[in-house]
Amino acid sequence: MTAELPASTRDLRRHVVVIGAGAVGCVTAIEALRAGLRVSLVEPDPPGGSQASSYGNAGWLSSHSVIPPALPGAWRKVPSWLADPLGPLSVRWRYLPSALPWLLRYLVAGSTEARVLRTAKALRTLIADAPHLHASLAKEAGVPQLIEQRGLLHAYRSRAEFEADALGWRVRKEVGVRWQEWQEDALREQEPDLDARYTLGIFVPEAGHCRNPGEYVAALAGHAQAHGASRVAARATGFRIVGGRLRSVRTDVGDIDCDLAVVCAGARSAALAAAAGSPVPLESERGYHVVIKDTTVGPRTPVMVADGKLIVNWMEGGLRAAGQVEIAGLEAAPNWRRAEILHRHLKSMFPQLSQIASENTAVQRWLGHRPSMPDGLPCIGPARASSDILLAFGHGHVGLCASARTGRLTTQLLTGATPEIDLAPFDPHRFS
Ligand SMILES: Cc1cc2nc3c(=O)[nH]c(=O)nc-3n(C[C@H](O)[C@H](O)[C@H](O)COP(=O)(O)OP(=O)(O)OC[C@H]3O[C@@H](n4cnc5c(N)ncnc54)[C@H](O)[C@@H]3O)c2cc1C
């Protein structure tokens, strides 16, 4: 970290404005400070607050989550996405015309095994050591207890259900992911509360998880501020660019003069990217969570089940079930029936929950916006109107996990260093 300068010293460091204090923005701020830049963190709401996707996610640091959301043959499921508004993936009819171009690109991106493999290889470079990087960030920020590295579990009802995911696991193996198979007895022994319909476990030892993503992000923001980052409670609205050089970031409370900027506004990044000359096909894949407080029933290892496509993870605040994908834009009201589906599924996974879940058992619910590009890869790179502006958003289902390396990469770009991985797959302009 940089040492703080005395107040009287004129600050000659290059000034970077980081827009958005979700996981990506906070790690970017920390890494930029470490590299000797002056940092302002612009965010209208409390860092780590419920407005951010980084707050309510499932907390998986799943270094093996390299498979894009759409796979070959996904187009066959389109009718059911439209017909079943409460299925694991749905598209609201009214929003269909707006979402159509994104949906078509989404289907094409996962249309062949070769494309899926290409995406997986790129994602793996971004997240392979994410649990380790996050453990080290959490330690640095004074919250080491929030990151655990003791594996993640996928539970299947049968081998046939696992075989239906064969492409995904084949591709994971090809990019270096290793796992253990837990047959029925071993699964029962490891997960005594899990419903007996699950008979096969796939355990990925390398992966980790976060026990409170909102607190973690708040701690990262606090750490950045403690080391000199200024927090500006404002919403960025655009940029003042003169002759290709960034002069200031425009906000709803005035302009902030700066040399550099990074757009990390999650699912709300598209307007800022367009203002920087880089229109991108960014969509919100809306997701939900429910948290049951006051229970001790649940998994020993954070678990994803194939039948409900939801993740169940112990958080500091209780047992969280997160999932669902709803394409309905940023502004539509939440459909809390989706949270109820998660709750019902959670209770079916852990039947004892139904016995103890009384009217007094508090259930929290939340809607969040995954910032998603059609191919499941983020945008990391300079904007067209000025190379002083970097884009760093679009991490979709793996943004918490991928934020650690993303912050390092944006800082390498900001300081002119050679990025530690190939950034070509994350080119923000790959769709234009
Ligand atoms: C249900 C669900 C489960 C998930 N599970 C996981 C998981 O297990 N593991 C995982 O890795 N990922 C998961 N994700 C995805 C992950 O949460 C996101 O990819 C990640 O949080 C994105 O981080 P971010 O910093 O880009 O955006 P955000 O966390 O959304 O932060 C963006 C911030 O920018 C601010 N902002 C917006 N507009 C402006 C503006 N104009 N000016 C200034 N600030 C602005 C917002 O207020 C917000 O605080 C899940 C998501 C959901 C919805």
Image (cartoon, rainbow, N blue to C red):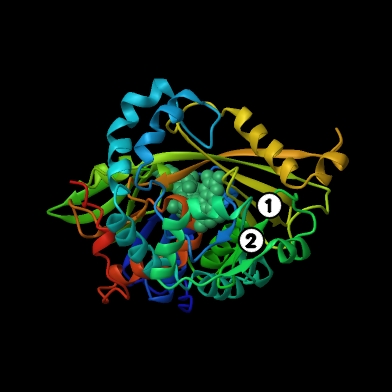
- Up/down of 359 relative to 353, above or below: above
* Secondary element at tag 1: loop
Image position of 119 (left or right of 24): left
> How far across and down, in percent of the image, does residue 149 sit?
62, 72
| 3 or 359: nearer the viewer | 359
Residue farthest along the left direction in this orientation: 243
Image position of 222 (left or right of 188): left
Spatial CA span between label 2 and label 1: 8 Å
**Type of the residue with mark 1:** Tyr
Residue wearing tag 2:
201
**Type of the residue with mark 2:** Gly
Residue farthest along the top direction in this orientation: 94
Q: Which mark is residue 198?
A: 1
> How far across and down, in percent of the image, does residue 133 sit?
51, 73
Task: Inspect this view and state whether residue 248 appears.
Answer: yes
Q: Which mark is residue 372?
A: none
* Secondary element at tag 2: strand
> How far across and down, in percent of the image, does residue 298 sit?
76, 53
The residue sitting at 71% across, 39% down in the picture is 364
| 370 or 262: nearer the viewer | 370
The answer to whether the residue labelled 2 contacts the one labelled 1, judged by CB atoms less than 8 Å apart, is yes
The residue sitting at 72% across, 66% down in the picture is 186
> Ligand 1 closer than 8 Å to the CB at disc 1?
no
| 425 or 245: nearer the viewer | 425
